[in-house]
Amino acid sequence: MNSNLPPSAQSPSLAGRPAASAKRGRIVAVASGKGGVGKTFFSITLSHAMAQRGNRVLLFDGDLGLANVDIQLGLIPHYDLGSVIAGKLSLNQAAMHYEQGGFDVIAGRSGSGSLANIPLSRLQILGEDLALMAARYDRVVLDLGAGVEKSVRQLARAADTILVVTSDEPTSLTDAYAFIKVTALERPNIDIRIVVNASNSPREGERTYQTLFKACQGFLKISPPLAGIVRRDARVRETIRNQTPILIRSPQSEAAVDVTAVAERLIAG
Ligand SMILES: Nc1ncnc2c1ncn2[C@@H]1O[C@H](COP(=O)(O)OP(=O)(O)OP(=O)(O)O)[C@@H](O)[C@H]1O
Ligand SMILES: [Mg+2]
């Protein structure tokens, strides 16, 4: 089967080992292709909702270019991924407890600038360390950067489930499809599910999902299920501006309720 793959998909440097945990959905990566579709908001709220349901959760900021989990949470991390990459800290030491949310966070911001140029081999080790660390948690949520570059895909290899977030915009759908395509070529058995975010209504969200689903079925011969539809909600922007999680500031808002439903389905398996 591998001989059908493009050369980039056969690169030995991408042949990472499977995640340490056998349980599907223990490490969930949140990806998108296009930037700005709500990955970080969704990752934070998903982590929070899972923690509220008694799960031990780690949220890992895997956006190597523009990490901003800490900013959305209003956290000032003492340690971050930059220190881990520099060899000053272990991944375990870089985790901090986010008291208000009841989950742990590994911040991605580096005092020394972007982490975008880390070699793939270093990212592979990072992913393996994360998979080992995941054994101490019920769930790890990995907020990825935008794009379909190898660095993003390499980090995503740590995950056993990938949630691909899209909006109804054609650019977002196209980029989500591109991400699914390269990922499915590299990892034919990967559990990919789709999240439609900022949808005007559940019905429109369903249509958006069907568009992407049909492209995946028709061209890639895969059938990614729907993980959930998150409605467009003015509270999202407001809570981000206030650097307070939506499940604290507006727990009854539509977006909060919708992400919580995704979390519940993931927990249920
Ligand atoms: N359900 C929603 N309803 C309304 N607005 C939303 C929703 N989800 C996200 N947004 C808006 O989209 C913006 C971008 O969200 P976020 O930073 O989480 O996206 P991202 O995919 O992580 O971006 P990047 O690719 O830059 O990391 C937010 O500031 C928010 O205003
Ligand atoms: Mg983000």
Image: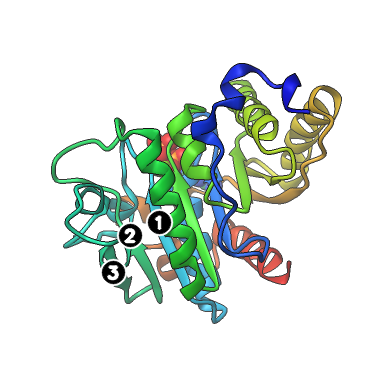
Element type at mark 2? strand
Q: Is mark 3 within 8 Å of ligand 2?
A: no
Give the residue number, with chain letter if any, for mark 2.
Answer: 106
Name the quadrant of the N terminus: top right
Circle 2: residue type: Ile
Residue placed most toward the observer, 103 or 114: 114
97 with respect to 30 (left or right)? left
Confirm or deny contact between disc 2 and disc 3 (CB under 8 A). yes
Mark 1 neighbour class, 10 Å CA radius: few under 14, some 14 to 19, many 20 or more: many
Residue 127 shows in this picture:
yes
Q: Residue 181: percent from the left, percent from the top? A: 68, 27
Q: Which mark is residue 94?
A: none
Q: Secondary structure at mark 1?
A: strand
Q: CA distance from mark 2 to mark 3?
A: 6 Å
Residue bearing the label numbered 3 = 96
Q: Position of residue 122 (x, y in %)?
A: 35, 42
Residue type pointed to by label 1: Phe
Q: Residue at x 57, y 45 (%)?
A: 232
Closest to the observer: 262 or 112? 112
- Identify the mark nearer the N-term, 2 or 1: 1
Q: Which mark is residue 60?
A: 1
Q: Is residue 134 above or below residue 226?
A: below
Contact? badges 2 and 1 (CB < 8 Å)? yes
Count numbered badges in the picture: 3
Disc 1 beta carbon < 8 A from ligand 2?
A: no
In the rendering, at what x and y percent does residue 26 appear?
59, 64
